Image (cartoon, grey):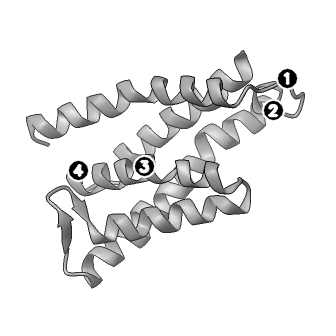
Amino acid sequence: MTRTDRAITGAAILVAPVIWLLAFYYWQPTFDPTWPLSDPRRFLFLVLLIPVIEELCFRGVVQPYLLLKTSQRYLLPQLSLANLVTSSLFASMHLINHPLAWSAATFLPSLLFGWLRERTGRVWPAAALHVYYNFGYFYLLDGM
């Protein structure tokens, strides 16, 4: 990774708490005993297992396939068509369990995960960042 890539990755890590605080501010949660922190197994499932599975599927299978099929076409210098389509599918899949606005909110982090996947050539950095985002989201919204 180049110095710029490391800077963007660092910014992605630093921006996550801002996203968590905005989510908390706009969605004032009330305590729910079924929320993840009340059940450690559920918390680990939502924070660790689901993001890893999503990244293996979307960034490990779908995005590389689309990169090959689109001849690695880029819409912008850092945004591939494959990443855009994969992120659209990723956000759409969140409609299964989330309202439209919340599913749409997964689109930008998904672009970031896809960018990280393409820049490193590996799925695990994107999966680790996804786990970090989910951890902060669930911990902040449940811990308050």
Q: Could you tell which of marks 1 and 3 lies nearer the N-terminus?
A: 1
Cα gap from disc 3 to disc 2, whole angstroms: 25 Å
Upstream in sequence: badge 3 or badge 4 = 3
- Residue under numbered circle 3: 108
Q: Residue type at mark 1: give it.
A: Phe
Q: Which residue is mark 4?
A: 120
Tag count in the figure? 4
C-alpha span from label 1 to label 2: 8 Å
Q: Residues within 10 Å of mark 3 (few under 14, many from 20)?
A: some
For disc 2, the marked residue is 35
Secondary element under disc 2, as helix, strand or loop, is: loop
Q: Secondary structure at mark 3?
A: helix
Q: Position of residue 108 (x, y in %)?
A: 42, 49
Judged by depth in the image, the label closer to the viewer, 1 or 2, is 1
Q: Residue at x 67, y 42 (%)?
A: 46
The structure residue drawn at horizontal position 72% and vertical position 62%, both measured from the top left corner, is: 96
Q: Answer yes or no: do the residues labelled 2 and 4 have beta carbons within 8 Å?
A: no
Q: Residue at x 20, y 74 (%)?
A: 72
Give the spatial CA distance, label 1 vs label 3.
Answer: 28 Å
Give amino acid for label 3: Leu
**Residue furthest toward the top?**
144
